[in-house]
Structures are given as structure tokens and as C-alpha cells.
Amino acid sequence: MLKIRLARAGAKKKPFFHITVADSRMPRDGRFIERIGYFNPISRGKEVRLEVNQVRIDYWISKGAQVSERVLTLIKENNETPEKRIKREEKKGKRRLQRIAKRAEMKSEEVPVEEAKSAEAKAEEAPAEEETPTEEEKKASTDSEKKPEN
């Protein structure tokens, strides 16, 4: 079975991916049939992030090649109009802000829980202190023991 998938290249901590057509039994970075593009996830400025030969992708799909999920999203991203791209990035920004707000909420909820636990611990310790006799009670009990009853 043929797969259209990513093959990793580049240095450690600096990934670069080739979009390749390969037999599914071959290793990820091993033998391939054809390179049909590349993906640079850490591109900056005017560097090209994604280059795809759409004609070759269509050809290989017509021959029965299966496209991996990540390559499929990259192809869709490549075919987007500028308006759709802006809309997608806005949604992504909103989701990011929601996650940040949710994390802040979780942290603020954790603090009272810890305070409640410490209050419970103090409450548990307090009865233990009350059960022990005070110094005055000790004196009173020792005085009564010393006095002989007539």
C-alpha cells in the first residue's frame, strides 16, 4: 500500500519534513518513491513554510495512495484562501485564550482547596489539645491526691 506521508530531516531540535510517497512497509525516513513537497514548521519571516506539488498528489491519490492525517491538513492549509486562513487563525487565537483562562481558573481554585485542607488539619489538632489536661487541672488533681480524707 502506498502512503503519502512526512519524512523527517533537519538537525536535532530543528525539524524539516519532506512530503513523500512511500510504501507503507518502509521506515519513516527510509526508501521512498517520490518527493512531492516539503514542510518547514519553524519557518520565520519570508521563508517558505509549505511547498506542495498538488498535481503529483492528485496523481498518486488516483493510483490508490493513502494520505496521512497530517499531510491532509497541510494540503487543506495550502489550498486555503487568505480569508479562510485569517478566520482559522482567529479561531485558533480564541481557543488559546480560552485555555489560558481555564488554566488560571484551575490555579485559583487550587489555592482555596489547600487552605481548606490546612483548616481541616487545624480543626483535627484542636480537639486533641483540648483533651489534654491544662496545668491548672494537673495541680488541682495532684492537690486532691495529697490531701488525706478524714
Image (cartoon, grey):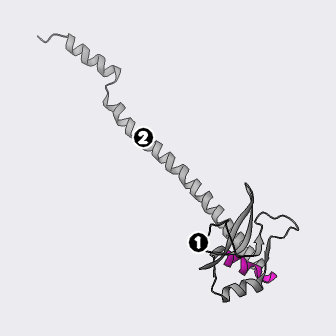
Three-letter amino acid code at the position of disc 1 = Arg
- The extreme right residue here reads 46
Q: Is residue 110 left or right of residue 117?
A: right
Q: Quadrant of the N terminus?
A: bottom right
Give the distance between the C-alpha atoms of the residues marked 1 and 2, in whole angstroms: 60 Å
> Vertical placement of 145 versus 35: above or below?
above
Instruction: Give the extent of the magenta segment.
Output: 71-84
Q: Which type of secondary structure does the marked residue at label 2 adopt?
A: helix
At which x and y percent is residue 125? 39, 36
Based on the picture, tell me whether residue 83 belongs to the magenta stretch.
yes
- Main secondary structure found in the magenta portion: helix
Q: Read off the residue under disc 1.
A: 25
The image quadrant that residue 123 belongs to is top left
Based on the picture, tell me whether residue 98 belongs to the magenta stretch.
no
Q: Read off the residue under disc 2.
A: 121
At which x and y percent is residue 23? 63, 75
Residue at image point 34% right, 24% down: 134
Mark 2 neighbour class, 10 Å CA radius: few under 14, some 14 to 19, many 20 or more: few
Q: Quadrant of the C terminus?
A: top left
Residue at image point 71% right, 74% down: 20
> Vertical placement of 109 versus 2: above or below?
above
At which x and y percent is residue 25? 58, 72
